[in-house]
Amino acid sequence: MAAPASAHGAMMVPGSRTFLCWRDGLSPQGNIVPQNPACAAAVATSGDNSLYNWFSVLRSDGAGRTRGFVSDGQLCSGGNPNFTGYNVARADFPVTHLTSGARLDFKYNKWAAHPGWFYLYITKDSWSPTRPLAWNDLEEQPFLVADHPADTGAVGSVDGNYYWSGNLPSGKSGRHIIYSVWQRSDSQETFYGCSDVVFDGGNGEVTGIGPGGGGGTPPPATGACTATYTQTGSWSGGFQAEVRVTNTGTSALNGWTVSWPLATGQSISSLWNGTYTPGGSVATVRNADWNRTVATSASTTFGFTGNGAGSTPALTCTSP
């Protein structure tokens, strides 16, 4: 197996082309052999290292530059010659299904952790997947900017990530690209990536990976999950709640993350059966070691006490 580069990260939710092609090619034997035809074509052009180093679509001299720095038709590779295969105009790359205008918990891998800003752009309605992405295909301004967001998990793995929540662009339908730019604040190094999405009322489901490549909806690699919230007690200035995580996929969960917006004045004072990561106005809880694995149709729970008035938030559950 080729040795990975020393850096650095890529969009995981919604997944970038390099990340989802890497997922597509994973096998129980540890080899990476893409099944998706677009991923296979990209690797045929850029080589196996473009999968082993899916987190390295970068320019060391980027300094946050975009239009006029990266050439039209090379946006998905950031002008990095090691990833030119991902610039190809195809409509069969793995795709994430989303709902226009909905709130989404974004996740960006931190293979090596560096502070910085994350800028997310969306393609115009006039864009077509039949031509390589150009700057004029993108809305001029980013629809979302994350300024040095919180991070969690270990570096050097898919478990380490930066995370933030925000609204997806409204009024969008059909196939689009979410284009990400990660500008480090401690160096000129800048990362670029294309995430293929379709606005069809989805909630982050990914299709086009696994056996069968671009067709059908393969089962999630580690299951899918939902989370339900129950307030179990309250008192003056505080409350207690329980969250149940249920595996709704067709294979066992191997890790899960639940997040929700905290109401004004709320904070978490203690939590059990999970790992709490403070994140400003968003609460994020990951599995403990002992309840990482959840069998199909099975559930696990975690509980917590909070300060402030109780509420009934909308929860988001994700698995690696």
Image (cartoon, grey):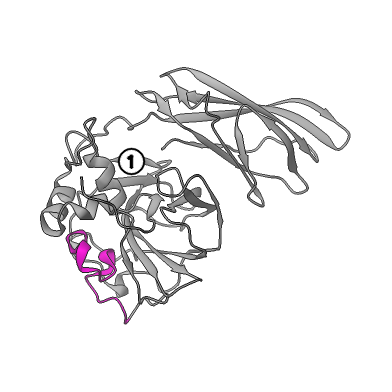
Q: Label 1 belongs to which residue?
A: 206
Specify whether residue 179 is in view.
yes
Using residue 270 as the reference point, say whether residue 293 is left or right of it.
left
- The image quadrant where one finds the C terminus is top left
Q: Residue at x 23, y 70 (%)?
A: 74
Q: Residue at x 74, y 43 (%)?
A: 267
State how many labels appear.
Answer: 1
Q: Dot 1: within a 10 Å radius of its alpha carbon, few (fewer than 14), some, or many (20 or more) residues? A: many
**How far across and down, in percent of the image, does residue 207 sit?**
28, 40
Q: Which one is nearer the viewer's eye here, 69 or 141?
A: 69
Specify whether residue 102 is in view.
no
Q: Residue at x 29, y 52 (%)?
A: 4
- The image quadrant where one finds the N terminus is top left
94 in magenta: no
**How far across and down, in percent of the image, does residue 102 sit?**
50, 49
Q: Which one is nearer the viewer's eye here, 111 or 293?
A: 111
* Residues in magenta, as a range: 68-86
Using residue 205 as the reference point, say whether residue 105 is left or right of it.
right
Toward which corner of the image does residue 243 lie, by quadrant?
A: top right
